Image (spheres, helix red, strand yellow):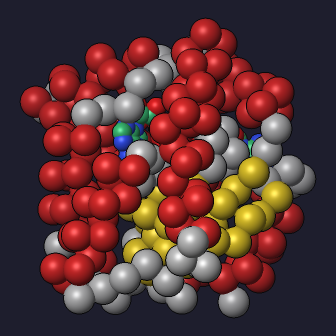
Amino acid sequence: MNRLLIIGPPGAGKGTQAAKISEELSIPAISTGDIFRANIKEETELGREAKQYMDAGNLVPDSVTNRMVRDRLAQDDASRGFLLDGYPRNTAQVEELDSILNELGQKIDGVLLLTADNEELVQRLLGRAKDQGRSDDTEEVIRHRLEVYAQETEPIVGLYEARGIVTRVDGLGSIDEVSQRLLAAIR
Ligand code: B4P
């Protein structure tokens, strides 16, 4: 399995685990959140557009996000595999990803669904707020991001379950314990 998605609520550990899996499998981890944050830092047009949505805890519009993912997946390093972290996040993005991969003659092999309860998620993100000061890690915005996840992202899990490619992995425990579970699920 070398074309993978990692899905989970904010704070479940997607970004943390994507970096580990990417290293272990030698495939690029592509995080839409990281690409947006890099653009915000460099003060690009894309960054300016994304920032207002991210700071409010809302999804960046599909028109912006889809184009960015299409360009990224066309790059050479993604031709032999990738782990998408934080994309797709709604049903329209699932359709767009299908269409991008269809054009490339590829398909998703597996979906890793990382789970954790809401109170743990809020505590982790408040902890990150202290360490990193991310502007979308205030308690109010965190709770809104959890609602957006429940309304927009959770429904896409069923779409992939119908394809029989979802593995649920418990995101509670140490970072290494969770990595071991994920790698076992992939293998
Ligand atoms: P993301 O960057 O995806 O942010 P996230 O959901 O908070 O997850 P992240 O990967 O950063 O955190 P993780 O769970 O690893 O999205 C941010 C914003 O970008 C979105 O709100 C949206 O506006 C926009 N966006 C991104 N993709 C989009 C898309 N496709 N469409 C539209 N908009 C999009 O880790 C969280 C914390 O938990 C860390 O501090 C970590 O150290 C800690 N942690 C991890 N594992 C742990 C463990 N096992 N135990 C204890 N702590 C742990």
Identify which residue, 39 or 79, lies in the foreground: 79
The answer to whether 26 appears left or right of 81 in the picture is right
Corner quadrant of residue 24: bottom right
Residue in the image at 23% along x and 80% along y: 102
Position of residue 183 measured from the top left corner of the image (x, y, whole percent): 71, 78
Farthest top residue in view:
140
Give the left or right position of residue 103, taking residue 117 as reference: left
Q: Quadrant of the N terminus?
A: bottom right
Above-or-below relation of 105 to 49: below
- Hey, which residue is sitting farthest right in the picture? 173
Image: 2 above or below 57: below
Residue 63, position as x, y percentages in the image? 17, 41
Q: Position of residue 96 (x, y in %)?
A: 26, 60
Residue name at image x 41 percent, y 17 percent: 55
Quadrant of residue 166 within the rendered picture: bottom right
Tell which quarter ligand 1 is in.
top right
Quarter of the figure that contains the C terminus? bottom right
In the picture shown, does residue 36 fall above or below 17? above
